[in-house]
Amino acid sequence: MAEKIALKERFSAAKAAFIGQPNQSLLRMAQRFSPAYGEPPRRATDDWIDLYNKSPRMNPVHQIASDVGTSEYGIYNMTDTRKTTKLINNPVEILLKHPNSNLTITEYVLFYITQVYLLLPAGEAFWIKERNGLGKVTEMWPVPPGWVSEIPSKTRDYFTIYPQGNMQCSPIYVPLFDMVYFKSPDVTNPYLRGIGRANCIGDELEIDEYQSKYQKRFYFNDAVPSMIIQMPGADESSINRAEENWSQKFGGYNNAKKTAFLNFDAKAQMLAATAKEMDFIESRKYLRDEVNQHFSIPPELFGILENSNRSTIDAAYYLYTKNVLRKQLKFIDDTLNAQLVPEFGKNYVFEHDNVVPEDDEFKLKKASEGLKNGGILVDEWRLSNGWEPLPEGKGQVLYTPLNMIPTRLDGTPVVLPQESAQETMQAESVAQPTKSAKRQFSPEQKARMWEIIDKAAVKNEQAFMANLKRYFQSEQDRIINKLEKTVKAATDDPDELLDWEEENGKLKATLKPLWLSSMKEGATAANEAFGFDIGFDVLNPKFLDWIDSYGAEKVTDINTTTQTKLQKTLSEGIADGEGIPKLKNRVLDVMNEAKTSRATLIARTETHNTVSTGTHETYKAAGVKKQEWLTSMDGRERESHADVNGEVVGVDESFSNGLAYPGDPSGAPEEVCNCRCTLLPVIE
């Protein structure tokens, strides 16, 4: 029998759905869940609203509500699950911007007080829909939750409202379809009246209010004197004379902190504030922080900056908009889309704009990665940075990842001259270094490549100079100290002044981190310019080997130059019979040159050479077979480097000037000092 009834109910439900009739079983379910009788508002709802207007602890509610009131929104038309652009002058927007004939109820006020009511313990807000003669909604009237004495139930399908909350007035009965009912649900029974977040901290808010009143009484003057003086046996006239005399002697700021001397028997008792009273300030700060945390409001939003900086302030606002404001706006969006927006069109959607600030650094990094990997056009990258597109469609190009060649949308390269078959055969058959007939990069691109790698070289130049100056200064101090301690006649042998092997170790330790940094800059420039992906962990062992071999030679050469200059000048001084003071001046001349012009030359040479080493090792690790010498032909290039400009050799071969790459440490000083040339990969 039970099976027949169940089958009959399923058939009835299917039939009702097919012909458009309401499902009676669902109607019965709604009736079962509805409250049996109209629910009154929660106790002390009006008291909480009054407290909101008085207590500074309610500032988090004001902060959230004011942000909700100022948040932008839009009305959209949903077609096939696709949201169109914002609709202009839509009737929903017009209604919300001018809710009713009361000019003080503006769009901001409408959303502001709604959010306040939702966060207070009532957890409810009500908008009455006022209709014209055609049944269209023309006005919205917000109603405080304390005025709504009953909500719809099984026995009543309307809201009961007492204007001004006065139960002596005649009630207003508002049908369910004429009310927009915002409700923060009570999880114990979501079908009864709402409950707001402030309900959880009722005790804390009341404690703060009582402490405030107590402090007010304490400071206002509650007829409690600061001191009591007892005069045993004195009559009233004696007490009055003593009081008057005391006030004359010690009253006023001119008599502050004077010592009192008495010629009569008296006892004084101070009535100081207790520790409990004085601790109220810290206690109120604790309650303030606890309330802010309860509403998930970072302290920076209220100007509490004891432990803050610019980064934490930006992060605080981001967290607030993401974890608090965005959720409140979503709640309002859903309520209006269910209860108000369908009145104006079934495809209309109300939605607030995204209030979460974008991470500008992440946005820029994302756009740059898209540009570098051929994912977005140059103009798209410019627009993402707030710049206008390039004129005449010059920004409608992509950059391919391999060698960063501009490419049009149809896939054809912008500039990529082709070599002839004869030139290709010559390039492959000639064993000795030759001028490359291939043009993998245009002149403009080569100039850009030179700028990228030169920028990497310059990056550590100042650090090299600073460290060299510090080293030469310390070396000077050691030489002068040893020279001053020389008892016998000064020597012209620098070996007696310093342990030069030890000095080589100190200089190598000074330059090692800078060498590594510059080589890493060279590797990074090569990876980014040509689309390689060689990790530093692969290159680091090669860089360390370079330091152990060529680095030791470098520091020996630098200190040998210092030794030679010292020996020459000290020999001249001793031959002229100079004493220690004048010999010290000769040492200072040598070391001042080391700290200035020599330090500059060494810094420029070493940064360029180690960056070139980094790029060369990266090309080899990336599998590049050939390399091209690129000279900066600006009129300042040396003749031997102008001769090898554009020359192509194998990546493990030397160019015709004897160097494996620009800045090769095995080359002669005249070939590597102040060199500005660059190495390019030949990508076949």
Image (cartoon, helix red, strand yellow):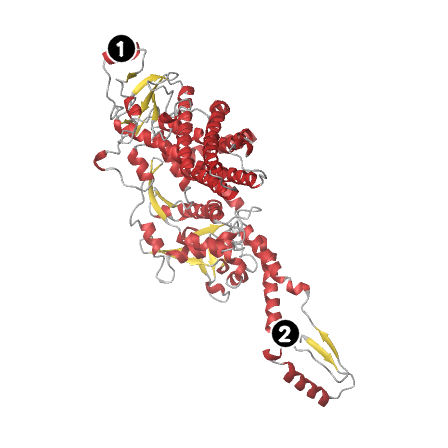
Q: Which residue lies furthest to the right in this view?
A: 233
> Taking the image as drawn, is residue 204 in sight?
yes
Amino acid type indicated by mark 2:
Asp
- Answer left or right for 37 relative to 88: right
Disc 1 or disc 2, which is closer to the eye? 1
Residue 173, by quadrant, is bottom left
Amino acid, disc 1 = Met
State the image coordinates of residue 111 (x, y, percent, origin top left): 42, 54
Residue 28, above or below 553: below
Residue 200 place in picture, x, y as percent: 58, 52
Q: Please name the residue that numbered disc 1 is placed on.
A: 425
Q: Determine which of the numbered discs, if any, sits on residue 677 in the image.
A: none
Residue displayed at 30% across by 41% down: 387
Label 1 CA crowd tier, 10 Å (few <14, some 14–19, many 20+): few
User: What residue is shown with label 2?
Assistant: 222
Earlier residue among tags 1 and 2: 2
Residue 594 horizontal side relative to residue 94, left or right: right
Please name whichever residue, 286 or 608, is drawn nearer the observer in this view of the structure: 608
Residue sticking out furthest to the bottom? 237
Helix, strand or loop at mark 1: helix
